[in-house]
Image: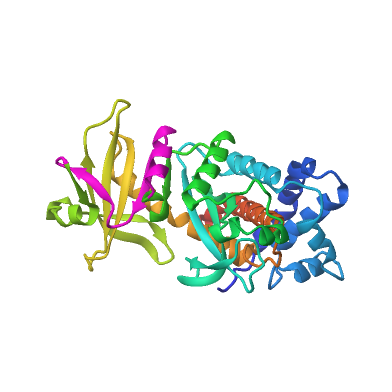
């Protein structure tokens, strides 16, 4: 993937913003040296190096070897989860808001060998096929001022969870056990809520939407959602269960309305949409809907969503939330293309979480700087 280069406005904004971030996270480092190295690492992730690996980040920091970078990611005394908490506070302060959308999704990190924590042959959405890779589950927020990655969990497959020798070599803590991707998403959502991340909706793909326990988790926490589900997902219809694709087959022609799911690289993403309510509103005034998206021309190409939230919710709001799921893909693309998310060379559990956390922080800084520059760019454009 071609890497976007930082603009002159980006570069001008980095120094002051990174200095503020450095003050924010300073208390997470017991010693000055790792604190300075972490700030240099963030600076390098936002820099112009062709690859954001240990050697090139070390060179950018003026070091002759990558030893100091390796020490920061592997052995220095600091807590990546605490820095993650600072990242969430930073995003709440600058980007998130009550009308925002929380998005759960995963991405693959292609790897060689068998020693990187959690690596095995498994499906990678990044590659679109089964590959030797690690998989990270992420939580993103899409707010009025931009979108950013908030949290991360490295998926540990069952084979890894029960292999004590591999766990020890990769430094996986004893407390870490096997958990499915929806369970990892639940952990991250709990942390985000505790951190004060307010969001009107949660959305995600069918990995999460087709998991009944995940949907119940959101309902129990009074969190409205718009979640993709598989075509064989069943719903109660007239005292019987029916597949969502069969229900969609029976929708009348007048049920379909055209709307954009948001802007993409080539402009608005137009689809046909249909919404069907299922059952009455519950005691708190919430309803369940089936939302169906189809291609404007190839009507057999459809996607299905289960939606639950306030009964007065307009169908266009459900469409808007379904479209916001693409924001996490944009986060992955920017984090990998500009902030080195996938260019780490560490194998350990601790190293993965440290690098990924700093990369996420770099992305948030980049998003904040660009959000501030946007009004000025628009104003400049109107004068021209």
Residue 249: x percent and y percent? 16, 57
Indicate whether residue 235 is drawn in magenta: yes
Is residue 141 among what the camera can see? no
234, above or below 27, in the image: below
User: Residue 304 appears in which quarter of the rendering?
Assistant: bottom left
User: Residue 68 appears in which quarter of the rendering?
Assistant: bottom right
Is residue 309 among what the camera can see? yes
19, above or below 41, in the image: above
174, above or below 381, in the image: above
In this figure, which colouring scheme has been used for the structure? rainbow
378, above or below 87, in the image: below
Residue 3: x percent and y percent? 60, 71
Residue at image x 26%, y 65%? Answer: 301
| 353 relative position to 231: left or right | right
- Residue extending farthest top: 283
Residue 308: x percent and y percent? 33, 39
Q: Nearer the viewer, residue 8 or 32?
A: 32
Residue at image x 59%, y 54%? Answer: 370
| Magenta stretch, residue numbers | 211-239
Residue at image x 60%, y 42%? Answer: 94
- What is the number of callouts on the image? 0
Residue at image x 57%, y 62%? Answer: 334
Q: Nearer the viewer, residue 213 or 383?
A: 213
User: Which quadrant of the figure contains the N terminus?
Assistant: bottom right
Indicate whether residue 100 is drawn in magenta: no
Q: Nearer the viewer, residue 169 or 344?
A: 169
Residue 159: x percent and y percent? 56, 61
């Amino acid at each position: 993937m071609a890497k976007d280069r930082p603009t002159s406005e980006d570069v001008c904004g980095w120094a002051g913003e990174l200095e503020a971030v450095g003050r924010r996270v300073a208390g997470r480092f017991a010693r000055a040296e790792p604190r300075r190295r972490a700030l240099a690492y963030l600076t390098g992730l936002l820099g112009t190096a062709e690859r954001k690996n240990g050697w090139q980040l070390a060179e950018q920091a003026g070091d002759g070897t990558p030893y100091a970078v390796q020490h920061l990611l592997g052995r220095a005394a600091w807590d990546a989860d605490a820095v993650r908490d600072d990242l969430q506070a930073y995003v709440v302060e600058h980007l998130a808001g009550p009308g925002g959308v929380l998005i759960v999704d995963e991405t693959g990190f292609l790897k060689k060998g068998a020693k990187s924590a959690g690596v095995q042959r498994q499906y990678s959405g990044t590659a679109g096929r089964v590959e030797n890779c690690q998989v990270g589950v992420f939580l993103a927020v899409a707010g009025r001022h931009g979108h950013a990655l908030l949290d991360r969990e490295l998926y540990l497959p069952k084979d890894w969870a029960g292999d004590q020798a591999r766990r020890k070599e990769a430094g996986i803590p004893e407390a870490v056990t096997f958990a499915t991707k929806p369970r990892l998403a639940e952990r991250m959502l709990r942390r985000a809520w505790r951190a004060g991340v307010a969001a009107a909706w949660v959305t995600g793909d069918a990995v999460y939407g087709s998991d009944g326990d995940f949907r119940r988790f959101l309902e129990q926490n009074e969190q409205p959602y718009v979640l993709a589900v598989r075509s064989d997902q069943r719903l109660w219809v007239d005292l019987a269960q029916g597949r969502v694709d069969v229900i969609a087959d029976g929708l009348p022609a007048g049920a379909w309305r055209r709307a954009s799911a948001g802007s993409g690289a080539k402009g608005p993403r137009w689809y046909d949409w249909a919404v069907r309510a299922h059952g009455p509103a519950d005691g708190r005034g919430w309803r369940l809907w089936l939302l169906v998206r189809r291609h404007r021309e190839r009507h057999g190409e459809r996607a299905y969503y289960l939606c639950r939230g306030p009964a007065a919710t307009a169908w266009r709001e459900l469409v808007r939330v379904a479209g916001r799921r693409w924001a996490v893909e944009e986060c992955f693309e920017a984090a990998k293309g500009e902030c080195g998310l996938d260019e780490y060379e560490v194998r350990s559990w601790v190293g993965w979480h440290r690098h990924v956390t700093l990369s996420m922080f770099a992305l948030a800084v980049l998003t904040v700087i660009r959000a501030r520059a946007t009004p000025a760019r628009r104003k400049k454009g109107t004068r021209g």
